[in-house]
Image: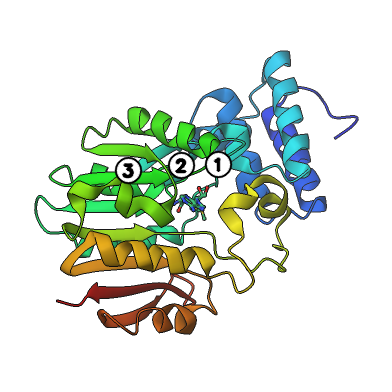
């Protein structure tokens, strides 16, 4: 990044792509363009157009761009640098202390929505930024959605996002998912959908991406020796919250479909594992037996 002509968008962009490529950032051009768009306050298409036209940035904006590119090169998540993550139809505010929502989780929401009757109730266990709960609330204004989170930092992000999305039909509660049924006595055996993307990385496994390893909270990642300890608590809580025939939809690692279905052997019907958009096992659903 040294010796750059300081202010032309096309030159800044070219240097940024080269820098991010050398830093092994997976999509260097996309990230360089999105950061340019961010500092200019425009969308990505407009940033590309300004670069094509060889437009000049003001010195402070060019300096800010270079600083963000350097941080991205150190593998800080793009979403921490822009402060937002896009998930399905909503924009979420994210930063240190909260798990950055992933595209594969959008499929989990699809399953949850399919199980939600008109005017129904959904509970999201371990809501993080609120991605799942607030998407459901946004896409189904007729539904009531309750989001639960144990980490105080993540809880604050979820509550901020509830206001950001303007989801009047969602409520964010602080608490442990293992005791969620005790926190919601009025909902015992009355919930239509329990959905969760719990921590599921086995304790001994080191995530490959530096963004995950260094910036996602450990409490959002690790799930005990086989990664399924939080899942066991999710299933136990869902057993108490769901009405007969109610739907449980959970996300898990690509090798955890069988282990998750094994937790649903008694008291559940229709247990099935579904692939994500890349064809990997990612979501298991089941219905509470009557
Ligand atoms: C993998 S992240 C998923 C966050 C969000 N649902 C999403 O899909 O982007 C797991 C979340 O569960 C929370 N969590 C972990 N253990 C929990 C527990 N025992 N009770 C409540 N929340 C918990 C973590 O703090 C984290 O926010």
N-terminal label among 2 and 1:
1
Tell me if 166 is positioned left or right of 289 in this view: right
Residue 280 coordinates in the image, percent (x, y): 49, 77
**Residue in front for this viewpoint, 154 or 278:** 154
Residue 111 shows in this picture: no
**Which label is found at residue 98?**
1
**Residue in front for this viewpoint, 157 or 3:** 157
**Which label is found at residue 38?**
none
Residue 32 shows in this picture: yes
The secondary structure type at the circle numbered 1 is: loop
Q: Going 54% across and 59% down the picture, which residue do you hit?
A: 199
Any atom of ligand 1 within 8 Å of the CB at mark 1?
yes
What residue sits right under mark 3 in the picture? 134
N-terminal label among 2 and 3:
2
Q: Going 43% across and 37% down the picture, which residue do you hit?
A: 92
Quarter location, residue 206: bottom right
Residue 245 coordinates in the image, percent (x, y): 16, 71
Residues at badges 2 and 1 in contact (C-beta under 8 Å)? Answer: yes
The secondary structure type at the circle numbered 2 is: loop
């Amino acid at each position: 990044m040294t010796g750059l002509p300081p202010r032309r968008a096309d030159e800044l962009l070219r240097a940024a792509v080269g820098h991010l490529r050398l830093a092994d950032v997976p999509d260097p051009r996309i990230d360089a363009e999105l950061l340019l768009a961010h500092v200019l306050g425009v969308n990505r298409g407009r940033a590309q157009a300004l670069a094509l036209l060889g437009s000049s940035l003001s010195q402070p904006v060019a300096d800010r761009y270079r600083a963000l590119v350097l941080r991205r090169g150190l593998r800080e998540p793009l979403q921490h640098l822009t402060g937002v993550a896009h998930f399905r139809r909503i924009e979420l505010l994210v930063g240190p202390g909260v798990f950055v929502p992933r595209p594969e989780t959008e499929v989990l929401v699809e399953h949850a929505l399919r199980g939600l009757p008109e005017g129904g109730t959904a509970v999201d266990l371990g809501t993080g930024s609120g991605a799942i709960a607030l998407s459901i609330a946004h896409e189904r204004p007729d539904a009531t959605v309750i989001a639960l989170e144990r980490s105080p930092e993540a809880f604050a992000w979820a509550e901020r996002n509830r206001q950001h999305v303007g989801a009047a039909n969602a409520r964010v509660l602080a608490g442990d998912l293992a005791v969620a049924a005790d926190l919601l006595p009025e909902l015992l055996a009355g919930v239509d959908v329990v959905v969760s993307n719990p921590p599921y990385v086995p304790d001994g496994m080191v995530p490959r991406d530096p963004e995950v390893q260094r910036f996602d909270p450990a409490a959002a990642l690790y799930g005990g020796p086989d990664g399924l300890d939080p899942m066991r608590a999710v299933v136990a809580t869902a057993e108490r919250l769901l009405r007969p025939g109610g739907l449980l939809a959970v996300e898990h690692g690509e090798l955890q479909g069988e282990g998750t279905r094994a937790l649903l052997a008694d008291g559940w019907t229709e247990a099935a594992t579904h692939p994500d958009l890349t064809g990997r096992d990612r979501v298991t659903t089941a219905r509470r037996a009557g």
